Amino acid sequence: MKTHVLGTDGIRAVVPVTWHLSHEVLSVCSSPAQVMAITNVRGPVPKRLRAGMVLILLLEDRYGRTSSFAPRTRFHVTASPGLLAGCCDIPVGPGQEFVFRDHGRNLYAFVYVRGELTSAAEAALNSLEVSAR
């Protein structure tokens, strides 16, 4: 599978070439605030994600205590995720939430995926390079 590097706001990830950064506001919260959204969806990301759609949404809590966030470890994205929905008006769909600290930054990763794209989403998440602020 061909890949390329996407990055913004001091965060980079290696993803399949058919994935891109979304510049849409997908979370209405100011803390945690949206810092990156990677997707394979062409056009606007729907409020309800369907099969075949991938979204990796990263939010950063700039005001929380660092001790509240566990240091980053390897991520494991399951093929049969639960349903993501809830705060900050984020999209709804099958996925997993990961909470972690990396280079002093408190991050939430919402990974919307199921089926055959699960391993690509996991690889993208594990490829994250986070720079300190």
Image (cartoon, rainbow, N blue to C red):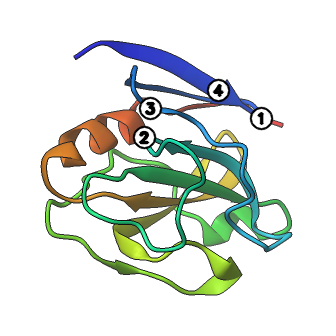
Residue wearing tag 4:
7
Question: Where's residue 25, x and y in %?
Answer: 75, 58
Residue at the far front: name it. Answer: 43
Label 3 element class: loop
Question: Where's residue 31, x and y in %?
Answer: 82, 70
Horizontally, is 116 left or right of 61 in the view?
A: left
Residue wearing tag 2:
40
Label 1 element class: loop
Sequence-first disc among 3 and 2: 3
Cα–Cα span, label 3 and label 2: 4 Å
Frontmost residue, 127 versus 100: 127
Single out the mark in the foreground, 3 or 4: 3
Single out the mark in the foreground, 2 or 4: 2
Cα–Cα span, label 3 and label 4: 12 Å
Sequence-first disc among 2 and 4: 4
Tell me if label 3 and label 2 are in contact, CB under 8 Å.
yes
Cα–Cα span, label 3 and label 1: 18 Å
For residue 9, which numbered disc appears in the image? 1
Label 4 element class: strand
Sequence-first disc among 3 and 4: 4
Where on the picture, by quarter, is residue 84? bottom left
Cα–Cα span, label 2 and label 1: 20 Å
Residue wearing tag 3:
19
